[in-house]
Image (tube, coloured by chain):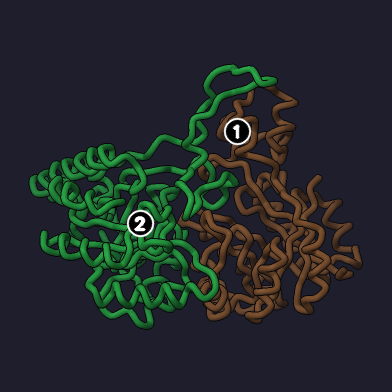
Amino acid sequence: MSFGGCEVLAPAGRMSDIAPLLEVGADAIYVGLSGYSARPESSDFSVGEIEEALGIIHGAGKKLFVAVNANVEGERIDELCELIKKLDKMGADAIIIADYGLIYRVSEFIENAELHASTLSGTYNAEDVRLLCDMGVRRIILSSDLYVDEIADIIDRVPEADYEIVADGGICFNSNRQCLLPHFGQKECYNVYCQKEYELLLSGKSLGRAKRIGNYPGKLHRTMGIYLGMGISSFKIEGRTNDFGYILQRVKDVVSSKKFFLEHLREIPGMMHYIRRSNWYGERR
Amino acid sequence: MMDKYFVAYESYDAKILESLCGDGDVKGIILGDALCNKRMFRGGISELVLMMNRVLSSEKTAIYQAPLYVTSRNRDEVASILGMMDGYKKESFVIVQDFGTAELISREFKNLRTVWGQLGRVRELRFSDEFLKFLCKRNFCGMETGDGALAKRLAGFGLVPFFSDAVIGYQTVGRVCYLEYETGRCDPLLCRKGCYSLREENGEYEMTVDGFMLGKKYRRAQPYDTEELCDIPSAELIRRIQE
């Protein structure tokens, strides 16, 4: 098989985050487009800020992706499409979108930037991926609740797509699609209720701290080699609303794992074949 | 109010199914559980197949609720059920939550029509106009919703609003049902019960925030929404029955 590369993708919630992220080895940075990402505006970038960020990031030879992954109703879609056209002309390397309808519309006018299907698009099978590829999507950001064998099957069936995985970030306690807890308010502060600390009360009397609802963040950096072997080419660190010191450490961990695994891939080329592909013995897919 | 409706029981047995097949008010029967068919049928998938055959051979319309996650693990199983339905050469419906399954149906099963399921969302409940247009483009005939305003919007796009009188809420930990997560097994006696009733029966189950997270399986739609449906000629009603 051919090796699709290994990109460390880091989140930036503020302009000041960018230089340190590049310094520790991020290959690409993603930001949210103000008002149109699935995060609050306080951690998003305006079009002007994205233009400034592009100068810095491209100057360092790295890439900038823009997330517009909130579902938008009504006339705001037209406004959003105009903004995406601007971002495309400006040189954004990719636009991350969740809404299939919006992906379809954007695919009709986008000229330079790649289209990436957000993890929120809920892509679970090879037919999904083929449809997205037919619409011009270059990269699939796999859902964090897929099992490893399911990921391997998708990549095996549609090897021509790029695949990204959340290497470090939240794992939903409830099914990604089913959580009944409030998740966020775009213009309010960012609230993920499953991640909050709770106290058990009985008739107003505290019984102590409650069990945390949400799972602790998933950290795949120690097992990145498995995912590289499967054909994942981008490893995302989530959390542009998190404490930046924490994010920087997570990026460093993933970057050092990348270095480790790539060195070993050179030493043992066969490592890439830990995942047996259907074309190994010339089998038909 | 519409006189005929589609019906979805939380669980089925032969007696329930026969009574539904003979009920003049029932237009169609929805079979299949989005997360676990052991919850809906004591005998799991084999009973789903038998009961689907029964509905298909009756005068009622069959609707298959496809799994929430159609992946490499269950794709063949889903495809075989679709093939069986298609083989009856009568119009049947499939509620799907992903475009991949819809593509498969559109490509290979000409007698099946797709309905976008109420679980076909990731975190957000909003649907853009572009998304609704995309459903039309991918040959969806309608969409299931418990929201009266959305039902009207759907009709405006030429999509049939399948108005569900209850919004489904599952008790899961990731993709594993809560009961299996807590006990490591599927227990037919405890399955299909909400957190609160589970707690009453056995205090040892560990709850989170007094069960708020997991909640009840169905949240009923506002009554005025169902009444407003009469103003939408194309609308269909789905009654979800919880024992």
How far across and down, in percent of the image, does residue A62 sit? 16, 60
Compared with residue A80, is residue A194 higher up or lower down, i.e. above or below?
above
Residue B193 appears in the picture as rendered? yes
Residue B185's label in the rendered image is 1
Residue A218's label in the rendered image is none
Chain in green, by letter, is: A
Q: Nearer the viewer, residue A16 or B99?
A: A16
Query: What's the colour of chain B in the image?
Result: brown
Q: Nearer the viewer, residue A128 or B119?
A: B119
Q: Mark 1 lies on which chain?
A: B
Compared with residue A270, is residue B134 higher up or lower down, i.e. above or below?
below
Q: Is residue B144 left or right of residue A143?
A: right
Q: Is residue B233 left or right of residue A214?
A: right
The residue tagged 2 is A44
Please tell me how many numbered marks the rendered image carries: 2
Residue B8 appears in the picture as rendered? no
Q: Mark 2 lies on which chain?
A: A
Mark 1, residues whose alpha carbon is within 10 Å: few (<14), some, or many (≥20)? few
Q: Which quarter of the figure is the N terminus of chain B placed in?
A: bottom right
Name the residue at the left extreme: A267
The amino acid marked with disc number 1 is: Arg
How far across and down, in percent of the image, does residue A47 sit? 31, 67
Residue drawn at (43%, 78%) of the image: A105
Residue drawn at (74%, 32%) of the image: B197
Q: Is mark 1 on a helix, strand or loop?
A: loop
Please tell me whether mark 2 or mark 1 is closer to you in this view: 2
Compared with residue A189, is residue A164 higher up or lower down, i.e. above or below?
below
Discs 2, 1: same chain: no
Mark 2, residues whose alpha carbon is within 10 Å: few (<14), some, or many (≥20)? many
